[in-house]
Every structure is written in structure tokens, then in C-alpha cells.
Image: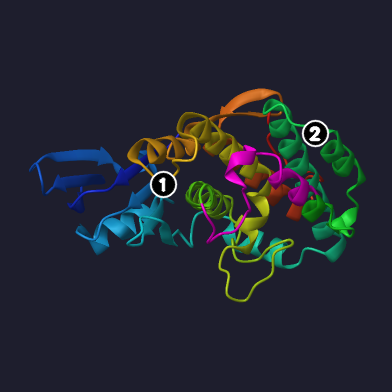
């Protein structure tokens, strides 16, 4: 069963009783309940939201990712469980002891999958994609020739319409805002799933940054980024240059956990696909598998 994504953009009081999330909306006085076990992602996007410590602890015990947004309504921080799997200590150990050659092979697989999905999206958008497929076939262990960056330079020049004069920059002009929002949701999904698979999101296979708590999440989300890009392409087609975040745009981006992806030849909600990806990664660390299972953009 796919877990629910809950978004709160109005004043609310959130508490818990009997393993239920109890929602009290200030404006309407409405009161609702949702089983905590059904929630995978909870987004808090208003300054007048109050959440109890007991509820927060229950959500984290359920391996729910909780995102808080800043005054610009962009995701600014995240809580996730540190005890999401009964075999966590064993899997942490396998992750810590992973050899350099293994991590280089895993990163090679990740980059190949990302570039292939970028190429597939370019093709869907009727842009030339042959060079990216060539790059994907040339990626070496550890991506020693940095084909990821070469592919990104080609991809970002072509994926959006020319009239946007787009440059990928986290703090740049729209649709960077839409990409940032979608990637933040994706990052939360991946971090949550890594924890559920008994892995430590901090310890990456490629990304290394002492100030980044989610290096492994940033690694594993790479092949999933084009699925977010695909949604942003849809938004651009419907809005042209008018790309400041609206409720309808946000609603579409909040559908990321449930959007259909193809993984091992079968359709699956993205959140479930991520779970299969992180489970396969755990098996790679433990020596039970040699390949990470990633989705294909078709």
C-alpha cells in the first residue's frame, strides 16, 4: 500500500491519540483523524501550525518523513527516523565497511541510470537525445570521466523551452523554484526509504560533505530526478513564463510519491519504487546482490 502525503498550508493544531493523527483546523474549526500508519510524508507549510512532541515521536516511529517549510514556502528541513529497521546495526556495519571498488561500481550504475532517464525525457520532449545515450554507454567505474556533468550540461540546455533561457541554479529564476520543491520532496522520500532499509542516509557512495546529513539520499535520488523534471515540463506547458509557485503547481508536485514509474518492467508508484531501490542497495552492501534496481523513464 502506498503511504499518504499530507500537506498543511493553513493554521492547524496537530496532535495524536490512539495511534491517530488528529487535525484541528483553526479557520474552520474542522476536526479530522488519520491513522498514523498510513502516512509516509507530512509537510508543514505555515507559521501557525502547532505539532505536539508526542505526535512527532509517533510519526518518526512509523518512519514518516516530516518536512518543514520556510517563509518562502520552500522545504527547509526534515525529520526522519533513526531506528527504521530491526537489522539496522548489521546493515550500518556493512555500509560502513563497503569497499571503494564496490562504491565506484554502485555510482557507475547510478550515473548510467540517471543519464538514460534524462535521455528518455529529452526524447519525450522531442529533443535530440542520442548523445546522452552515448554518454550512458561510456560511463566507467566511479564515473571517472565525469559523464554525469557532461550529460547535465547538454540536458539542461534542451529540456525546457528556449524562451525561458533556463540555467540550473538553486537560487536562480523559475522554474528552478519548481525543481527545488520537487527535489526536496523526492529527497525526503529517498531518505525515509533508506532508513526503512536499515541504511544511514548520511554516508554516501559518491556525495561527501561534512555539512550534509543526506549524502546517500542525494546519491540514490539521482536517477529519479528526471521524473520530477517531467512534472515541471508539464507545468511549463500549461503556464508558459508564469512560473511563480501556485497552489495548482504545488498540488502537482505533491503527487510525486504516487506518480507512476516503471521498475523491472512493471508500473509502480514512485514511493514504492524507491523502497525497492533502497532494498536492493542494502543487498549490494551485504554482498547478496551486485546491482541497484532503478526505474526507467518510459
Residue located farthest toward the bottom when viewing the structure as drawn: 210
Q: Which residue is mark 1?
A: 244
Residue closest to the eye, 241 or 215: 241
Q: Main secondary structure of the magenta part?
A: loop
At which x and y percent is residue 33?
20, 39
Q: What distance separates the C-alpha of mark 1 from that of mark 2?
A: 29 Å
Residue 3: x and y, percent? 42, 37
Where residue 115 sits in the image (x, y, percent)? 77, 42
Q: Left or right: where does residue 121 sit relative to residue 88?
A: right
Considering depth in this image, is 198 or 64 the residue closer to the camera? 64
Residue 81 visible from this viewpoint: yes
Q: Secondary structure at mark 2?
A: loop
Secondary structure at badge 1 equals loop
Q: Is residue 1 visible?
A: no
Task: Identify the mark at residue 129; answer none if there is no mark.
Answer: 2
The location of residue 28, given as percent across then percent down, is 9, 41
Q: Residue furthest front?
A: 163
Other-residue count near label 1 (Cα within 10 Å), few / some / many at <14 / 14–19 / ≥20: few
Amino acid at each position: 500500500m502506498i503511504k499518504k502525503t499530507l500537506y498543511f498550508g493553513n493554521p492547524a493544531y496537530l496532535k495524536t491519540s490512539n495511534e491517530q493523527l488528529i487535525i484541528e483546523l483553526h479557520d474552520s474549526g474542522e476536526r479530522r483523524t488519520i491513522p498514523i500508519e498510513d502516512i509516509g510524508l507530512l509537510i508543514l507549510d505555515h507559521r501557525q501550525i502547532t505539532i505536539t512532541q508526542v505526535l512527532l515521536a509517533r510519526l518518526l516511529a512509523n518512519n514518516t518523513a516530516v518536512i518543514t517549510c520556510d517563509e518562502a514556502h520552500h522545504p527547509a528541513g526534515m525529520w526522519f527516523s533513526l531506528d527504521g529497521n530491526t537489522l539496522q546495526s548489521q546493515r550500518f556495519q556493512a555500509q560502513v565497511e563497503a569497499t571503494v571498488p564496490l562504491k565506484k561500481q554502485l555510482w557507475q550504475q547510478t550515473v548510467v541510470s540517471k543519464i538514460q532517464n534524462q535521455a528518455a525525457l529529452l526524447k519525450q520532449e522531442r529533443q535530440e537525445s542520442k548523445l546522452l545515450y552515448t554518454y550512458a554507454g561510456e560511463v566507467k567505474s566511479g564515473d571517472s570521466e565525469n559523464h554525469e556533468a557532461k550529460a547535465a550540461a547538454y540536458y539542461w540546455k534542451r529540456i525546457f523551452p528556449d524562451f525561458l533561457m533556463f540555467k540550473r541554479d538553486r537560487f536562480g529564476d523559475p522554474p528552478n523554484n519548481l525543481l527545488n520543491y520537487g527535489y526536496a520532496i523526492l529527497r525526503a522520500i529517498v531518505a525515509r526509504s533508506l532508513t526503512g532499509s536499515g541504511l544511514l542516509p548520511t554516508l554516501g557512495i559518491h556525495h561527501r560533505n561534512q555539512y550534509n546529513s543526506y549524502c546517500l539520499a542525494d546519491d540514490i535520488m539521482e536517477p529519479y530526478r528526471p521524473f520530477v523534471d517531467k512534472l515541471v515540463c508539464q507545468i511549463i506547458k500549461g503556464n508558459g513564463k508564469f512560473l511563480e509557485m501556485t497552489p495548482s503547481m504545488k498540488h502537482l508536485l505533491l503527487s510525486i510519491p504516487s506518480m507512476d514509474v516503471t521498475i523491472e518492467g512493471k508500473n509502480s508508484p514512485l514511493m514504492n519504487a524507491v523502497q525497492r531501490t533502497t532494498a536492493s542497495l542494502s543487498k549490494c552492501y551485504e554482498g547478496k546482490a551486485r546491482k541497484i534496481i532503478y526505474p526507467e523513464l518510459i
